[in-house]
């Protein structure tokens, strides 16, 4: 049973915030690397590219797994992997070739398993329910799960993705190779959370000709 905390318990509690820098700090703030984040948007908007970029950056802090359920180990994924310079992450990143829920949980239960998991995408995780999400997060409370989802009528799709979006600490909407980020770790200080993140400058400039990137 959970105990009630005093006012001082809350104010004196300490947390392990990641020391993000540069444009990552400007967009995300200094987040805890556990819980749930979500990336969502339409097809061809840059979700996978951004997911790979984010996985590469996060590998500086924790061992990271990119579980590709849609593309798997394919030529198109290899191109995206190379384009984002993932080779630079070395052993900090491992690739999951269509590792579905049951096998994923087995791998994450092992010693020295990845602490951050990017799942691309929820749509390809057939039969994934709200209860599956709750059980996964509860089983691995110290890990960070980043789900990639499609978008329909402004909401994350399918419905379980919208449920996850509502519960996520960081919500990332991708359109035209521009990521718009809502972060619970933004502290209101300029340059520490909330700024848009340009994923691919050339393509973003083509999509947003009126926007200064």
Image (tube, rainbow, N blue to C red):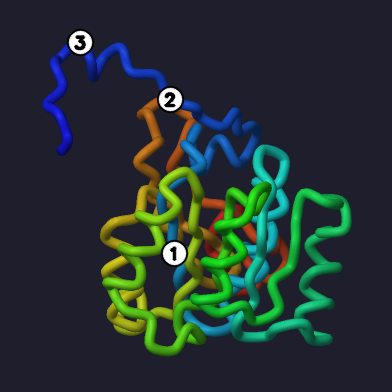
State yes or no: discs 2 and 3 in contact (Cβ < 8 Å). Answer: no
The residue drawn where x is 46% and y is 28% is 190
- The label shown at residue 8 is 3
Seen in the image, is 83 located left or right of residue 4? right
Q: Secondary structure at mark 2?
A: loop
Q: Secondary structure at mark 1?
A: strand
Seen in the image, is 111 located left or right of residue 175? right
Cα–Cα gap, marks 2 and 3:
15 Å
Q: Is residue 197 above or below residue 78?
A: above
Seen in the image, is 24 located left or right of residue 174? right
In the foreground, 14 or 159:
14
State yes or no: discs 1 and 3 in contact (Cβ < 8 Å). Answer: no
- The label shown at residue 173 is 1
Q: From the image, tell me which residue sits under label 2.
A: 15
> Of discs 2 and 1, which sits in the foreground?
2
Q: Quadrant of residue 163?
A: bottom left
Residue 106 screen position, x and y as percent = 56, 67
Q: Secondary structure at mark 3?
A: helix
Residue 174 screen position, x and y as percent = 50, 67
10 Å crowding of disc 2: few (<14), some (14-19), many (20+): few
């Amino acid at each position: 049973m959970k105990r009630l905390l005093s006012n001082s318990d809350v104010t004196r509690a300490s947390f392990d915030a990641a020391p993000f820098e540069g444009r990552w700090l400007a967009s995300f703030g200094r987040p805890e690397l556990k819980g749930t984040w979500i990336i969502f948007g339409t097809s061809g908007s840059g979700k996978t590219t951004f997911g790979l970029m984010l996985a590469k950056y996060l590998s500086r802090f924790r061992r990271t797994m990119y579980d590709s359920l849609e593309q798997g180990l394919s030529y198109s994924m290899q191109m995206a992997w190379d384009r984002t310079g993932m080779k630079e992450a070395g052993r900090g990143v491992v690739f999951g070739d269509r590792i579905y829920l049951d096998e994923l949980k087995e791998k994450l239960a092992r010693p020295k398993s990845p602490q951050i998991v990017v799942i691309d995408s929820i749509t390809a995780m057939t039969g994934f329910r709200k209860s599956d999400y709750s059980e996964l997060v509860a089983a691995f409370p110290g890990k960070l799960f980043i789900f990639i989802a499609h978008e329909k009528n402004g909401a994350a799709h399918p419905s379980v993705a919208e449920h996850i979006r509502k519960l996520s600490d960081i919500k990332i909407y991708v359109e035209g190779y521009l990521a718009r980020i809502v972060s619970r770790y933004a502290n209101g200080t300029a340059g520490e959370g909330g700024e848009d993140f340009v994923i691919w400058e050339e393509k973003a400039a083509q999509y947003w000709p009126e926007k200064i990137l």
